[in-house]
Amino acid sequence: MMGIVQVLERLILFESDILYQEYASQDEAEFLYVEGTLPILISAPHGAAHTRYGKYKGEDEYTAAIAQLVAEETGSRCIYARRKSKTDPNVAKDAPYKEKVREIVLEKNIRFVIDLHGMWQRHEAGIELGTRSGKSCPEQKELIVSSLKESGFELDSDEKNARLRVDAKFSGNGSSVREPMVKFVSERLKIPAAQFEINAENRIVVRREDAAERDKSFRGNPAAIEKTLRAFVTLVNMLNQSFQR
């Protein structure tokens, strides 16, 4: 796999196609699907800004770039938001993004969905895993935790960027009016899924001027970003291997 500098450069390149604050024009797509060979779909529904309950909500920077780079490195499939949405692709029950996910899952015989999101740097973990207390991926939860541990993300890590939390603040359970992707996939599409909230320090290479956050000088931790990218590559490969048994 590429070195840390190349990883950062590739992420910046992939992210350059995402316009956080602009709606799609008539001749371009609000979200894009990238074909692959593995039965695993990586999703980044908040790659650009969106609307939740009629209110503006900023983008999860670099989640779209991470989805694309992990897919490129593994051969998995990916879908990501690349333009601002008038709905919330993740929690709105009738979001066009979700209908595309349904189509991909059915047509491509997808066996697992990895849903990527971003959390602020103030959170005391590098990655927060949401499995709806195991309900969204009962047969894979242990494998996921084991894979992340193998990549250096542990529950009791003294280093925030290497700390893993499971089904804590971001469990993916949603509510009667909120249907997170992992709930949609596991309950309505009947395949396993897991939600991953990635700390800003573990994903944002360089904050762009069009980002929603005011602090344009923010930069993530290069080593933590590379470590996170490698962790997802390892996870995809381990999940795929489990499907071959």
Image (tube, rainbow, N blue to C red):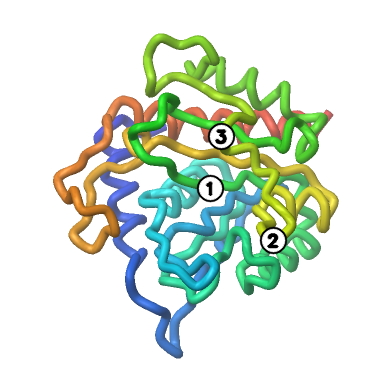
Residue at coordinates 34% horizontally, 47% vertically from top-left?
A: 11
Residue at coordinates 44% horizontally, 88% vertically from top-left?
A: 27
Which amino acid, mark 3? Lys
Dot 2: what SS?
loop
Distance in Å between CA atoms under marks 3 and 2: 18 Å
Which comes sooner in the sequence, label 1 or label 3?
1
Distance in Å between CA atoms under marks 1 and 3: 27 Å
Give the quarter of the image for residue 179. bottom right
Distance in Å between CA atoms under marks 2 and 1: 31 Å
Residue topped by disc 1: 71
Dot 1: what SS?
helix
Residue topped by disc 2: 177
Which comes sooner in the sequence, label 3 or label 2?
3
Image position, residue 138 (x, y; %): 81, 31
Residue found at the very far bottom of the displayed protein:
26
Q: Which mark is residue 62?
A: none
Q: Which-is-in-front pick, marks 1 and 3?
A: 3
Which comes sooner in the sequence, label 2 or label 1?
1
Instruction: Name the side, left or right, on which 48 lies relative to 95.
Output: left
